[in-house]
Amino acid sequence: MQVQGYEYGFFTVLGVRPLSQRGNPKSTSIYVVRCRCGKYAVRSLRVIRNPANMNDMCEHCRHLYNLRRRNRFLTEGKDVDLSELTGITDKKPLNIKE
C-alpha cells in the first residue's frame, strides 16, 4: 500500500517502519510520520485512515495546544475545541494506491 506523502492533522506519512523495529512482526503495518514541528512518531494504518482523527499531532504539539486552550478558558471563560485553534476542520480521504 502506498500512503507515503499523505498529510493529515499535523502529520505527513514518511514510510513504513521496518519489521526488525516492530514488537510483533505479525502486527499491522506501522508507519513513521513527521509532525509540523519536526518531531517523529509512529502510527498504524488504522489510525491514519480514521476520518475522525483530523487533529492528530505529536505529544509536544498536543501539550502546547492544550496550554493555549487552557489559557483561553482562563482569560475569556470560553472552552474552545481543538479544531478551532488548529484551523483544521476536515480530513481529506486517503486514496490507497496498491
Image (cartoon, grey):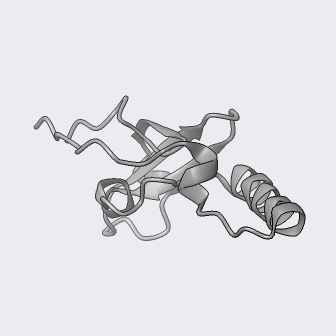
Quadrant in which the N terminus is drawn: top left
Tell me what residue is drawn at x 34 percent, y 47 percent: 91
Q: Is residue 93 above or below residue 25?
A: above
Q: Residue at coordinates 31% horizontally, 69% vertically from top-left?
A: 26
Q: Position of residue 24 (x, y in %)?
A: 42, 70
Q: Quadrant of the C terminus?
A: top left
What residue is at 80 percent from the left and 55 percent from the top? 68
The residue that appears at 41% across and 60% down in the rendered structure is 53
Q: Position of residue 35 (x, y in %)?
A: 60, 39
x and y percent of residue 77 in the render? 80, 70
Q: In this view of the protein, which residue sits in the foreground, 14 or 47?
A: 47
Q: Name the image quarter holding residue 7.
A: top left
Query: Where in the figure is residue 42, as x and y percent of width and height?
Result: 52, 53
Check the image and report above or below for 91 versus 38.
Answer: below
Query: Is 40 above or below relative to 67?
Result: above
Extreme top residue here?
Answer: 5
The front one of 34 and 9 is 9
Displayed quadrant of residue 50: bottom left
- The reply, left or right, for residue 3 in relation to residue 60 is left
* Towards the viewer: 52 or 84: 84
Direction from residue 31 to residue 71 in the image, left or right: right
Q: Is residue 53 left or right of residue 1?
A: right
Query: On the picture, is 77 further left or further right than 41?
Result: right
